[in-house]
Image: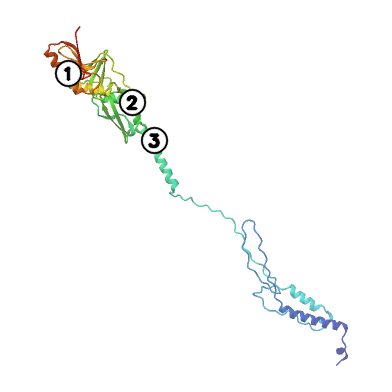
């Protein structure tokens, strides 16, 4: 061997030592596994973007899934370039690392641009629409009922009257040209009873669209009470009311005074209609005497002796003011009549108010 191959210079020894260290580092670099790097997704203000899939990078910046083992050995240059430039290998290594492909950046979903869409309104028949049409129909119906003729009342159909004409009742109804929807049947009834006390009751029915039916019940007079030039008709319940119309063969009572005041059966709140004129007991006595009085006689009333009649033979007979024992009173009178005729007695007054103690008076 030549002497230059046996004796090494200090520079060559340092170079060999560095080459050995470099080889050891390259062997260790092939065994290293890179730690995966996960970059957090940047937070957006309004719409957070989904996190990207983690990318595992190799030792050389290449994704681990696609990275292939690659030798980091650098070929030794020949000739004087190696001996003359000891840092050549180091510079080539740094150059290979510098020119290695950069790792691919994770791809993030970009926020979508705000889009404005204009759609046509959808018209549906929901509960609100149906309610609107119902309310509208009610308003139109109410307007028609208050303004159009089929719903306006003019004349009423009246039944049950005999003493009072229909026209007279029509004049007091107060329904002419008034919508039937606003008529008050109770007020119409009050109008009838206030105008004609001889009507005991009135029923008012308002039918669709504008028909009004009035049914009245009139009081039937059984006698006419005549006192101080005034006449009051009496019905079978003892109610008195003004005469109206014409009643044939109506018996009359000539009163010498007012009948006794009636406390029972009076309604202090009554302001319209007929009022009780005679008590019920006295009224029944009047009806009993009307069916038993002699023909051609007239009933009379005396505040002291009660009700009776003027007998055609020239005397007055009274039966009191109560219908109690009315049949017995008539029998007693018949017995007294037979007695005075048998004895040729001419009395001026006979009273059988008390059947157990009848009496007669003679002219003085």
Nearer to us: label 1 or label 3: 1
Q: Residues within 10 Å of mark 1 (few under 14, many from 20)?
A: many
Q: Nearer the viewer, residue 356 or 58?
A: 356
The residue that label 1 is drawn on is 333
Give the residue at the far bottom of this rendering: 1
> Looking at the picture, does residue 342 appear above or below residue 29?
above
Q: Name the mark on residue 143.
A: 3
Give the residue at the far top of this rendering: 364
Nearer to us: label 3 or label 2: 2
Alpha carbon of mark 3 to alpha carbon of mark 2: how far? 28 Å
Q: Quadrant of residue 289?
A: top left
Q: Residue at x 41, y 40 (%)?
A: 136
Q: Quadrant of residue 21?
A: bottom right
Q: Nearer the viewer, residue 132 or 156?
A: 156
Q: Name the mark on residue 222.
A: none
Q: Nearer the viewer, residue 310 or 117?
A: 310
The residue that label 2 is drawn on is 191
Alpha carbon of mark 1 to alpha carbon of mark 3: how far? 74 Å
């Amino acid at each position: 061997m030549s002497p230059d191959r046996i004796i090494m210079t200090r520079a060559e020894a340092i170079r060999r030592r560095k080459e050995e260290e470099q080889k050891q580092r390259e062997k260790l670099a092939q065994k290293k596994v890179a730690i995966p790097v996960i970059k957090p997704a940047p937070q957006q203000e309004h719409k957070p973007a989904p996190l990207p899939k983690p990318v595992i990078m190799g030792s050389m910046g290449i994704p681990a899934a696609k990275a292939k083992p690659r030798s980091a050995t650098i070929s030794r240059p020949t000739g004087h370039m190696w001996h003359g430039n000891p840092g050549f290998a180091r510079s080539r290594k740094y150059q290979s690392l510098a020119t290695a492909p950069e790792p691919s950046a994770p791809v993030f979903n970009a926020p979508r641009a705000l889009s404005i869409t204009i759609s046509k309104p959808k018209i549906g028949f929901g509960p609100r629409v149906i309610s609107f049409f119902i309310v509208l129909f009610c308003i139109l119906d109410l307007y028609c009922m208050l303004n159009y003729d089929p719903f306006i009342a003019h004349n009423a159909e009246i039944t049950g009257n005999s003493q009072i004409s229909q026209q007279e009742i029509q004049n007091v109804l107060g329904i002419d040209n008034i919508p039937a929807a606003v008529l008050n049947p109770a007020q119409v009834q009050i109008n009838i009873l206030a105008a004609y006390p001889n009507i005991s009751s009135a029923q008012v029915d308002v039918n669709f669209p504008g028909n009004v039916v009035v049914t009245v019940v009139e009081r039937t007079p059984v006698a006419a009470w005549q006192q101080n030039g005034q006449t009051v008709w009496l019905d079978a319940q003892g109610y008195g009311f003004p005469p109206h119309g014409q009643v044939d063969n109506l018996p009359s009572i000539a009163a010498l005074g007012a009948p006794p005041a009636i406390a029972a059966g009076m309604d202090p709140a009554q302001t319209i209609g007929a009022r009780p004129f005679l008590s019920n007991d006295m009224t029944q006595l009047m009806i009993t005497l009307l069916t038993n009085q002699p023909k051609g006689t007239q009933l009379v009333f005396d505040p002291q002796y009660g009700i009776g009649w003027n007998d055609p033979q020239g005397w007055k007979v009274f039966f009191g003011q109560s219908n109690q024992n009315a049949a017995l009173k008539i029998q007693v009178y018949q017995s007294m009549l037979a007695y005075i005729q048998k004895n040729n007695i001419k009395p001026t007054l006979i009273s059988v108010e008390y059947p157990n103690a009848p009496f007669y008076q003679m002219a003085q």
